Image (cartoon, rainbow, N blue to C red):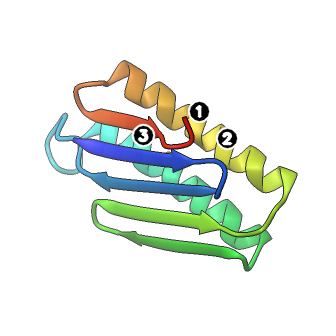
Amino acid sequence: MIEIKYNPHVRRLRVYGHAGSGDYGKDIVCAAVSALVLTLAQALTEITSDADVDISEGYADILCTRDSAIIDFLFATIAGGLRSVAETNAEYVNFIDVAG
């Protein structure tokens, strides 16, 4: 199972685990989560040097200390996509909004 923890107050997204909804390399749930997480990481590293991005196999930790409406929008948009993936694939993805 993939676990996603999102905290908009500190602009942090942590993702770990594997969906296991399909064979390795053909897991569409994992692909959806990966695409969204990598999009956030790429966007942040292009617009600010205040992003700390740590991504490895089955793990991502993205934190941004810069206070910006655009960065808040990026996090909220990606979190919305991840929340949707979790809602439609609850047996494979757990989304936790740690801010409440």
Q: In this view, does 23 lie to the left or right of 44?
A: left
* Residue found farthest to the top: 88
Q: In which quarter of the image is residue 94?
A: top left
Residue 61 image position (x, y, % from top left): 46, 65
Q: Which residue position is annotated with label 3?
A: 32
Q: Which residue position is annotated with label 2?
A: 76
Name the residue located 50 percent from the left edge and 53 percent from the top edge: 37
Residue 56 image position (x, y, % from top left): 34, 70
Q: Is residue 96 left or right of residue 1?
A: right
| Distance Cα–Cα, label 3 vs label 1 | 13 Å
Instruction: Answer whether labels 1 and 2 touch (C-beta < 8 Å).
Output: yes
In the picture, which quadrant includes the C terminus? top right
Amino acid bearing label 2? Ala
Q: What element carries label 2?
A: helix
| Distance Cα–Cα, label 3 vs label 2 | 16 Å
Q: Which of 94 and 77 is in front in this view?
A: 94
| Distance Cα–Cα, label 1 vs label 2 | 6 Å
Amino acid bearing label 1? Gly
Res 80 label: 1
* Residue found farthest to the front: 100
* Residue found farthest to the bottom: 49
Q: What element carries label 1?
A: helix
In the picture, which quadrant includes the N terminus? top left
Q: Quadrant of residue 73?
A: top right
Q: Image height check: is 92 above or below 70?
A: above
Amino acid bearing label 3? Ala
Ranked by sequence position, the earlier of labels 3 and 2 is 3
Q: In this view, does 54 lie to the left or right of 21?
A: right
Res 95 label: none
Q: How crowded is mark 2: few (under 14 residues within 10 Å), some or many (20 or more)?
A: some
